[in-house]
Amino acid sequence: MYILTNDRCTVLYTGVTSNLPQRLWEHLNRVDRKSFSARYNLMRLVWFEVTGDIRGAILREKQIKNWRRAWKVRLIESLNPEWKDLSESWL
């Protein structure tokens, strides 16, 4: 699971994948130009969580998607208080 945002941190996108580096590459290269992440320029990885169970990850994604923005902000800031792009060193 992961959360992306834009440069101004005004929009949050929650997603789930089995291959985070590949999925980030797809977001950054706007593979689907009509996607939500492409429309809102969501290219900064600000939070992620690794699980060994895809079903659990999907349930967690759905849970977080239903959270209020303030709760998501707290989650992000608990591990990444400066909202740095966590994928900078990967790609």
Image (spheres, helix red, strand yellow):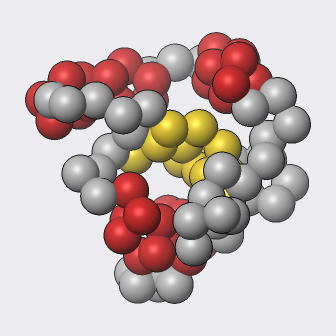
Instruction: Write the residue at 32% across / 45% down.
Output: 16
The percent coordinates of residue 51 (x first, y second) are: 28, 29
Eyeballing the image, is 10 above or below 47? below
Q: Is residue 14 left or right of residue 47?
A: left
Viewer-side residue, 28 vs 63: 28
Instruction: Write the residue at 67% across / 58% down.
Output: 44
Q: Residue furthest front?
A: 89
Eyeballing the image, is 5 above or below 82? below
Instruction: Write the residue at 15% across / 29% down.
Output: 53
The percent coordinates of residue 4 (x first, y second) are: 59, 50
The percent coordinates of residue 39 (x first, y second) are: 59, 72
Viewer-side residue, 63 vs 23: 23
Q: Is residue 46 left or right of residue 8?
A: left
Eyeballing the image, is 70 above or below 7? above
- Give the number of marks: 0
Instruction: Write the residue at 71% across / 18% down.
Output: 78
> On the rendered image, what quadrant is the C terminus found in?
bottom right
Residue 14 visible, this orientation: no
> On the rendered image, what quadrant is the N terminus found in?
top left
Q: Is residue 12 left or right of residue 78?
A: left
The percent coordinates of residue 87 (x first, y second) are: 61, 58
Residue 22 visible, this orientation: yes
